[in-house]
Image: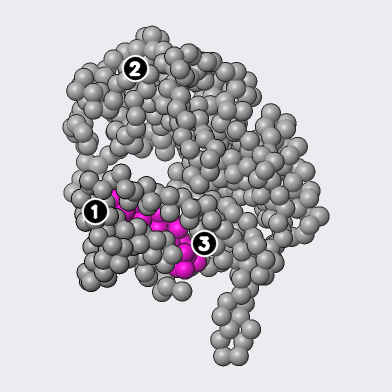
């Protein structure tokens, strides 16, 4: 915590957890929304500027870090200004109706493994705090309406939960895949349609006005402010929630007759039993998206039949393919859906390692470079370990070892062989982490979290 809390939380007694008023508020809102699907909430605005809600919002913004917005105020500068003072000012502005969000700062970042760039909108720190407070209040209400087929940007759900569905559907005999994603989803969602979806649950006029203010704040690029009539700024704290709220309409329209839908934000996969069902699923997806003012990205839309020994499909960073297990005692083995890091994910890993060990960084100590490579490898492997990734891990770790060895050789102006000898003579290879033995292979009807808690699985 950067600063102490404004007040101590009362405890419930010896051994009990401290009472969390913000969590209690969220649970109350969720239960109310779940108990009455037709209820529209009208008294929410005063909860957005509650002191404990604003403090929770500040803590989340502080933990996430991030660059400054158009006002150039960093999180460190906000702390110097005084967190209590900042939150009191925001609370007063919200309560008195004086709060106005600033336009977000537009930057362009490269997509991992691609030459294409993605627009990113960076709100000011003060606006991120208010957006987070608004998210704290609204998310439990809309979470009560979201369906099991949605996995992205939802509490207690992850990409690996979505991937587990693919394993189980394939195990059940569904071998036709419709894959697509929504073209420019965050910038294409129409404001009118989005606000219509929000008003299905929210009728508090001040909350709706605050949401419209964020949507209309626009972005600043090259000194000019643009205010669009569609889209939620990609990079805004509340944008993922609003995206899910709008795409819940697609989830509701989906029927089991079209196949099993798996949606992670704007990435979509339908798992089907036959080509005919897959073609119908693709037609329905296209029609539903068109009715929402959205379109599938043609370059990423296709139907794939999963066949042993043939290429599969990429989804959520993994490549998925039918393979046959090693036979045991004269058996023929069994066919299952395996997954490992996709070529794009591997290329991204190599690019990052190459960047951290490039010639321009020869002034940095070897220990620092190895520590940075280790930090990246831990995060990268931490995600991809839940798959059949051992072979890929060997390749990526071998590439990292080679790059560090070359870095050592260049730094000391010696030959490549000398650099490799330094790596292999050292029992710990200069501290470069090992990725051996950390893979947890997925299994149908055995949730990945349970396998993790059980201590993982021996490497394959």
Residue at x 63% of width, y 20% of height: 192
Q: Magenta residues: mostly which secondary structure? A: helix
- Earlier in the chain: of badge 2 and badge 3, it is 2
Closer-to-camera residue (215/449):
215
Residue position for label 3: 340
Residue at x 44% of width, y 21% of height: 104
User: Which residues make up the magenta segment?
Assistant: 370-392
Categorize mark 3 by other alpha carbons within 10 Å: few (<14), some (14-19), many (20+). many
| Mark 2 in CB contact with mark 1 (< 8 angstroms) | no
Residue position for label 2: 71
Q: Is residue 444 left or right of residue 454?
A: right
* SS type, badge 3: strand
Residue 358 % position (x, y): 34, 48
In this rendering, which labeled residue sits more in front, label 1 or label 3?
1
Closer-to-camera residue (66/7):
66
Categorize mark 1 by other alpha carbons within 10 Å: few (<14), some (14-19), many (20+). some
Q: Is residue 291 visible?
A: yes
* SS type, badge 2: loop
Residue at x 40% of width, y 10% of height: 97
Residue 441 belongs to the span the image colors magenta: no
Residue 65 % position (x, y): 32, 34
Q: Is residue 183 above or below residue 128?
A: below
- Whole-angstrom CA distance, mark 2 to mark 3, is 43 Å
Which quadrant, please, contains the N terminus? top left
Q: Which mark is residue 411?
A: 1
Which residue sits furthest bottom?
329
């Amino acid at each position: 915590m950067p600063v102490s809390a404004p007040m101590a939380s009362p405890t419930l007694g010896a051994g009990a957890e401290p009472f969390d008023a913000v969590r209690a508020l969220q649970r109350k809102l969720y239960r109310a929304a779940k108990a009455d699907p037709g209820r529209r909430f009208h008294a929410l605005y005063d909860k957005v500027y509650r002191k404990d809600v604003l403090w929770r919002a500040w803590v989340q913004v502080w933990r996430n870090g991030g660059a400054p917005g158009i006002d150039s105020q960093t999180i460190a500068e906000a702390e110097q200004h005084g967190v209590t003072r900042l939150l009191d000012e925001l609370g007063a502005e919200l309560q008195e109706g004086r709060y106005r969000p600033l336009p977000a700062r537009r930057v362009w970042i490269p997509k991992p493994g691609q030459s294409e760039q993605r627009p990113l909108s960076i709100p000011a720190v003060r606006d991120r705090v208010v957006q987070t407070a608004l998210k704290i209040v609204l998310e439990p209400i809309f979470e009560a309406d979201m369906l099991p087929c949605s996995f992205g940007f939802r509490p207690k759900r992850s990409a690996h939960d979505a991937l587990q569905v693919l394993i189980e559907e394939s195990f059940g005999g569904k071998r036709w895949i419709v894959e697509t994603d929504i073209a420019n989803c965050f910038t294409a969602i129409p404001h009118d349609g989005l606000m219509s979806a929000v008003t299905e649950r929210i009728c508090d006029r001040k909350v709706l006005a605050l949401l419209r203010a964020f949507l209309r704040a626009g972005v600043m690029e090259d000194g000019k402010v643009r205010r669009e009539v569609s889209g939620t700024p990609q990079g805004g704290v509340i944008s993922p929630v609003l995206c899910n709220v709008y795409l819940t309409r697609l989830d509701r329209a989906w029927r089991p007759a079209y196949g099993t839908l798996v949606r992670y934000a704007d990435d979509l996969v339908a798992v089907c039993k036959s080509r005919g069902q897959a073609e119908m699923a693709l037609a329905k997806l296209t029609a539903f998206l068109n009715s929402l003012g959205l379109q599938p990205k043609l370059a990423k839309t296709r139907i794939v039949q999963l066949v042993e020994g043939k290429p599969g499909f990429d989804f959520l960073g993994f490549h998925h393919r039918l393979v046959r297990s090693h036979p045991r005692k004269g058996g023929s083995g069994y066919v299952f859906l395996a997954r490992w890091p996709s070529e794009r994910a591997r290329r991204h890993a190599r690019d990052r390692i190459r960047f951290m060990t490039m010639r321009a960084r020869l002034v940095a100590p070897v220990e620092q470079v190895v520590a940075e490579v280790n930090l990246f490898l831990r995060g990268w492997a931490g995600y991809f370990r839940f798959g059949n990734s051992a072979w890929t891990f060997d390749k990526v770790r071998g590439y990292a070892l080679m790059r560090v060895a070359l870095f050592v050789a260049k730094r000391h102006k010696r030959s490549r062989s000398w650099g490799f000898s330094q790596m292999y003579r050292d029992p710990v290879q200069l501290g470069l982490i090992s990725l051996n033995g950390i893979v947890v292979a997925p299994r149908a009807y055995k949730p990945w979290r349970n396998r993790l808690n059980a201590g993982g699985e021996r490497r394959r």
